[in-house]
Amino acid sequence: MLKQLANWWKRRGGSEKATAEDTPDPAQIAAIEQARAAMRDRPALDGTIRIVEIDDPAIAAQLFRRKFGQEIPQFPRHFVALAGDVCAGYVHYTAWQGDYLCGGLCTDDRVYRALSPLQRAWVRERGGIAEIMMRHAHAALADGATIWGYIGDKQAEAVDRRVGFEKVAEPYLFAIWQKPISAEGKQRRIAEAMKLGPF
C-alpha cells in the first residue's frame, strides 16, 4: 500500500502517469487529503497550553468552584493554564515562612477534550495540563526553599511525584526541597508543616 501511495503522490504532482495497479482507493485518497489539511491548518502546537501568573484569579473561579465547591482564594500566588483564552487549569501557592504551600490544583477535562488530536498528543507528551502548569510555576517560585503539598488523591500524587514532590510525613505531606537544607533543618520544617493540616 505504501508503494501505491508513493506512486499516487508522484502522479498527483504531474510527474508520472496513472496505472490501475498504483491507484489507491477513494477512502485512502480522502484520508491523505484530510491529513494534509489538518497539518496545514493546525495551530502552532507550542501555543496549545500557556501558563500565566495572574493577580486576579477570576478567570479560574468557575473551575475552582466546580472542583472544590468553594470560592477561589483571593491572596497570591495564582497560576493558570490557558488554552487560547479559556482556563484549562489552576494552581495556587501561599507564601509561608520562606516556603510555598501548593494547593487548589485543578484542571478542566472539558477544555482538554475540546483540543484537536494533535494538541492532545502534545499535552500528553508533556505529562498533562497539571504537570505543565506545576513545572512552570515551580520554576517561577525558585525563591522558596521548599514547596509543600498536601496530597491525598492517588492520581494527583502520581503527577506531583513526577514534578519532584516526595512524601515526607504521613498521611499526605509532601515536599520539594528547592534549596540545600540539612537533615536537621528538614525535620524542623516538616514538624512545622505538619501542624498546618490540609492546606
Image (spheres, rainbow, N blue to C red):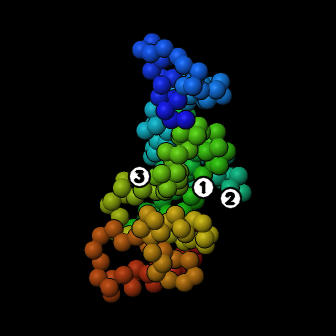
Q: Nearer the viewer, residue 124 or 55?
A: 124
What residue is shown at x 59% (from left), y 21% (from top)? 20
Q: Is residue 164 above or below residue 36?
A: below
What residue is shown at x 33% (from left), y 68% (from top)? 178
Q: Which residue is mark 2?
A: 68
Alpha-carbon distance for marks 2 and 3? Answer: 23 Å
Q: Which residue is mark 3?
A: 136
For marks 3 and 1, the one nearer the N-term is 1
What residue is shown at x 50% (from left), y 66% (from top)? 160
Q: Secondary structure at mark 1?
A: strand
Q: Nearer the viewer, residue 6 or 189?
A: 6
Whether pointer 3 and pointer 1 mark residues with C-beta atoms closer than 8 Å, the reply is no
Q: Which mark is residue 64?
A: none
Q: Is residue 175 left or right of residue 24?
A: left
Q: Which residue is mark 1?
A: 106
Alpha-carbon distance for marks 1 and 2? Answer: 9 Å
Amino acid at pointer 1: Cys
Amino acid at pointer 2: Phe
Amino acid at pointer 3: His
Position of the C terminus, as image quadrant, is bottom right
Q: Can you give x and y, in whole percent of width and height, for residue 40 in the image?
A: 49, 25
What residue is shown at x 57% (from left), y 49% (from top)? 89
Whether pointer 1 and pointer 2 mark residues with C-beta atoms closer than 8 Å, the reply is yes
